[in-house]
Image (tube, rainbow, N blue to C red):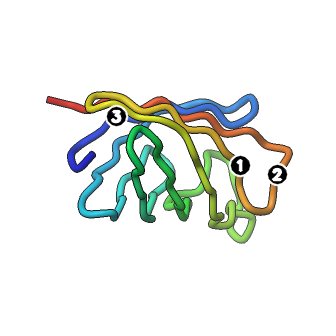
């Protein structure tokens, strides 16, 4: 699993893509508005991740002090050498399904 990955995600009606670096159980990455930092574990074809998602720039038109707060998310799923599919939800929003499709680069 160690390597550089492209991640496409959906979270309710929101969608986007970002980049992830997985190395020795650690995960870092980001997209145009968030950074990701966490850890992952694999057990055969199963993959589990625990990630802190933190905004790094306010959304357009957003006033100071109303910025989105960091949140923790737990994802579980399956993987191959070149792809992974994960599902989960933020800790504070069990009603919000998050899906992530990952593809290894290179």
Rendering coords of residue 13 (x, y %): 74, 28
**Dot 1 lies on which element?**
strand
Q: Which quadrant holds residue 11?
A: top right
Q: Which quadrant holds residue 73?
A: bottom right
**Dot 2 lies on which element?**
loop
Rendering coords of residue 91 (x, y %): 74, 61
Tag 3 or tag 2, which sits nearer the N-term? 3
> Which residue: 66% across, 39% down?
98
Label 3, on which residue? 6
Residue 45 shown left or right of residue 99 in the figure: left
**Dot 3 lies on which element?**
strand
Rendering coords of residue 23 (x, y %): 24, 59
Label 2, on which residue? 94
* Closest to the observer, 5 or 70: 5
Label 1, on which residue? 89
Quadrant location of the N terminus in the rendered image:
top left
Tag 1 or tag 2, which sits nearer the N-term? 1
* Closest to the observer, 68 or 30: 30
Above or below residue 105? Residue 31 is below
> Which residue: 45% across, 58% down?
35
Quadrant location of the C terminus in the rendered image:
top left
CA separation in Å, label 2 and label 3: 25 Å
CA separation in Å, label 1 and label 3: 20 Å
Residue found at the far left of this picture: 106
- Other-residue count near label 1 (Cα within 10 Å), few / some / many at <14 / 14–19 / ≥20: some
Callouts 2 and 1 close, C-beta under 8 Å: yes
């Amino acid at each position: 699993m160690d390597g550089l990955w492209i991640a496409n995600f959906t979270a309710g009606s929101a969608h986007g893509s970002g980049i992830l670096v997985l190395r020795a159980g650690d995960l870092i990455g980001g997209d145009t508005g968030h950074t990701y930092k966490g850890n992952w574990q694999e057990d055969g074809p199963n993959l589990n991740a625990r990630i802190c998602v933190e905004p790094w720039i306010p959304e357009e038109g957003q006033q100071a002090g109303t910025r989105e707060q960091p949140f923790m998310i737990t994802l579980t799923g399956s993987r191959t050498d070149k792809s992974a599919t994960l599902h989960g939800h933020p800790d504070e929003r069990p009603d919000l399904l998050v899906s992530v499709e990952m593809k290894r680069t290179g």
